[in-house]
Every structure is written in C-alpha cells, then in structure tokens.
Image: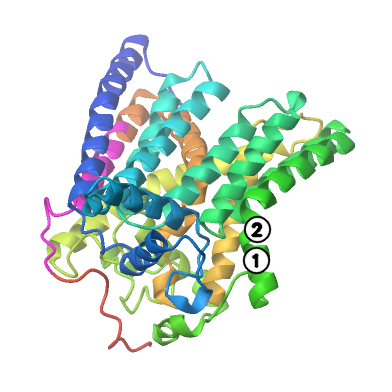
Amino acid sequence: MTRAPAPAESAALGALARAGFPAALFAAVALRLHNAFHYPPDWGFDASFNWSYIARLGRDWSLPDPEEGWSTADPPLFYYAAAALLRLCRALGDPNAALWLVPLAGTLAGLAIAWLAHRLVRVLHPEDRARARVAACLVLFLPAQIHVSAMVNEEIWTSLLASLALFGLATEAPARRRLSRALAVGAAAGLALLAKLTGALALAALLASYALEGLRQRALRRSLWLASAAALAGLATGGWFFARNALRFGYLQPHALAVHSRMLGMPPGERGLLDYLYLPLSTFLDPQLLDPGLLRSVWGSTFATLWFDGHRYFLPLGGAGVRILGTLTLLLALLPSAAFAAGCWQAWRRAFAPRTPPPRDLPLLLLVPLGLVGYAAFAWRNPSFAVLKGSSLLALTLPFSYYASGALTSWGRRSREAAALLLLASLALAVCVLLGTSFGVFFTRDALPGLPWQEVRVP
C-alpha cells in the first residue's frame, strides 16, 4: 500500500509545481518566438515547395492542378491563408514580412492548442488545477509540436482545427447535445480536413461519438440527426476539395504522382509486418531515421521524431552531444508516453463499462485508435523514411495531453517520493527539449536541413 504524502510535504511539492508553471510557460513561449524569427523559412518539411505554392496563390487565387508542383495536391486551406498574408504584406509595401509572419502565425496556433489542453481539463475537472497545468506543459514541451510551429506547413493548423472540434464536443454534456454545437464542431473538423487529409479522422471521431452516445442512451434517432448535421457541416467546409478532385481528376486523394517520383527512391522502399512490431535499441542510441537499426522500424522512427529531431531539421547531423541529448530526451519521454497509454487504457475501461453513461471525453478517446491506424496505413502505402514523422500524429495532441496529464497527476499523488521523482523527471525532460529545439542557440547547424539519403543502402 502506498503512503500518502503528509500535508506539509504535499503543500510544499504543490507550491513548487505552481511556481514552476509560470517559468515553464515563459520558457516555452520565448523558445517558440525565438524559433519563429530565427528558423530559416525554407528549411521545414517541404517548406520550399510550400512557399512556391503560396507564391502561386499570391499571384492567382485559382486552384492549380495536383501535378503542377510538389505541394499543389495538398488541401488548400493553409496555402490560401498564407497567400492572404503574403498579399497583405505586399499591399503594405513589405512582401518579405510574410517570411516571418507565416511562421509566427504557426507559433500562435501551437500556443492556442496548449491553451485548449489547459481549458479542457479545467472544464471537465474544475477541481484539478494541477492536472490542467500538466496538460498545458505536455503540449508546450512536445518537440514535434515545437518543430512544426516554426515551419511553413499545414501540420500545426490541422492539429489546431482538429483540437477545436474535439474540444467543442467534449465540453458539451452528452445529455444536452444541441444542433448548433454539432454544426460548429463539424465545421471545425471540416476545416481540419481542408488543411490536411488527416482531418477526416477528427470528423470520423465526432460521428462515431454521436452514434455510440445514441446507442448507450437509447436515443439513436436524435444522435443520428446530430451526426448528420456535423457530417454535412464538415463536408461542406472541407469535403468540396476532394469532391472536386474526384470529378475533375478521378481520385479523392492523389497517390504516386509523377511530381513525387523522388519519393519512390527513398529507403527503405517497402514495408513488412515486422516493421510495425519492434522498437530497436537504435531508437535511443542514435535517434536519426537513416540509422540501419531504425530505418525499418515504423514506431521507433515515429517516437524518435515525436520527441526528438530524428529528421535533423533543427540539429546537426552528427556529434556526440546530439546523440547523448537524443538518448536522454527519448529515455525521459518514455514517462509521458507510458502515462498516455495508461490514461487511455483507464479511460477505455470507464467508457465501455456496462451500465455507465457515455463520458464527455469519448470523442478524444475514439480519435486515438483512428489516428494510429490511419498513420500506420499511410506508412504502409508510402514506404519511405521521410513520411515517418511524429508531426503527422499531432491531431492527437489534445487526447495525449488530456490522458497523459490524468495519469501523471494520479501517480504523483501516491506518495511524496513519487511526486518528487515525477517533478524531477519532468524538469529534466523540459530542459532536454529546450536544448534540442532552440534553433541555433545550443547547437550550430550550418548545412542544409534533413538527412542525406541518396547513398543509403537498405539492409
């Protein structure tokens, strides 16, 4: 039996955690603002191609054909928004200002997700302020989120819009579902879909949540009506782009276009079932995706890019310092990752226990398996190391922060020793993240970004 902390000990640890939150918030915001102004605007994932698309829309608002450029097959919401900023800067006489305004907007989007994580816990668990602070910090110090907040791409916007949809449904009691809320969350999920195809998973989670609530409450007709309204709003805001593709080009989402032929030459070139079933030691010893031991591991590569710079877009290609930092970061990241798994498992057992009402967090819970299965299927269909990015799972940011924060705070309340250990490990992880994601501060990167894959031979 675990010993509960004495009142004085508990108060001291609680005061330390409360005092640390403003410092953590300041450090996280300062880090992101630094990256927004110092990270090269053409260094992010596909950033140079994205700028070409943005410049194209800056001259002509019409949608290009999918094969016109590398990024022109992507849903257009982010590119239209960035092009609007570019046109505004041009009208004000300083078009180059868009080079930092677009990353700054992404930075604000990332901070908004952290606020949603904090607010979600405050709404669903108003008595647990500590958990709300932990949820916010889990977002603020998630390396993949920090990376894409500074990059010129659609990932952070997809994550924000999906989070808005989940937040909107989870903060409304199932017994009080309204048509207006169904339309709003459906539209938010539709906008996520218009930013990236993974937004479809958020819409699917909303619809499944409505349907399961109807079955549990024996109000299936009402739930189907609300689900239909959400689906209609989502398809109206985001589905039209894919309908256009189907009518004009014969497919909903293009695959293996000629303009993307370079991807076909990237290792490993194929995937097997075993690639999904092991986590190699290289994940921790040399966390870069072209390491022979890591190259074929789907979840090892994903973990190395979710919690570290496995693609080397922020850090140098080699060096003992980078490897040591990667090892420390990823070992410490096992703690919030385990907390997420434990929190999901407990939530799953509560949600589907007999004779229990549908929980308010059901849409968050449903998105987790949908997101993981969708990501695994995408990796199977596109067998190159470049598609394995933790940022592709950022639509799960809100579920991750919610469930991991629940488990971590529960573990910390078991004893004084547990609370102190968790606080120390969290502080160490935050320091490692700051060291590894502060572009150009602690590590100098003077070469082109990314990994040199052309000479790699697949074992």
Q: Secondary structure at mark 2?
A: helix
Queried whether the magenta region covers residue 245, the answer comes back as no
Vertical side of 10 occupied by 433: above or below: below
Q: Residue at x 74, y 28 (%)?
A: 177
Queried whether the magenta region covers residue 433, the answer comes back as yes
- For residue 43, what is the image quadrant? bottom left
- For residue 219, what is the image quadrant? top right
Instruction: Give, as a single range, the part of the protein colored magenta.
Output: 423-446
Q: Residue at x 35, y 39 (%)?
A: 108
Vertical side of 47 occupied by 133: above or below: above
Vertical side of 268 occupied by 401: above or below: above
Query: Mark 2 sits on what residue?
Result: 240
- Residue nearest the viewer, comparing 272 with 6: 272
Number of other residues with Cα within 10 Å of mark 2, as a class: few under 14, some 14 to 19, many 20 or more: some
Drawn side of residue 355 relative to residue 388, left or right = right
Query: Mark 1 sits on what residue?
Result: 244
Vertical side of 281 occupied by 348: above or below: above
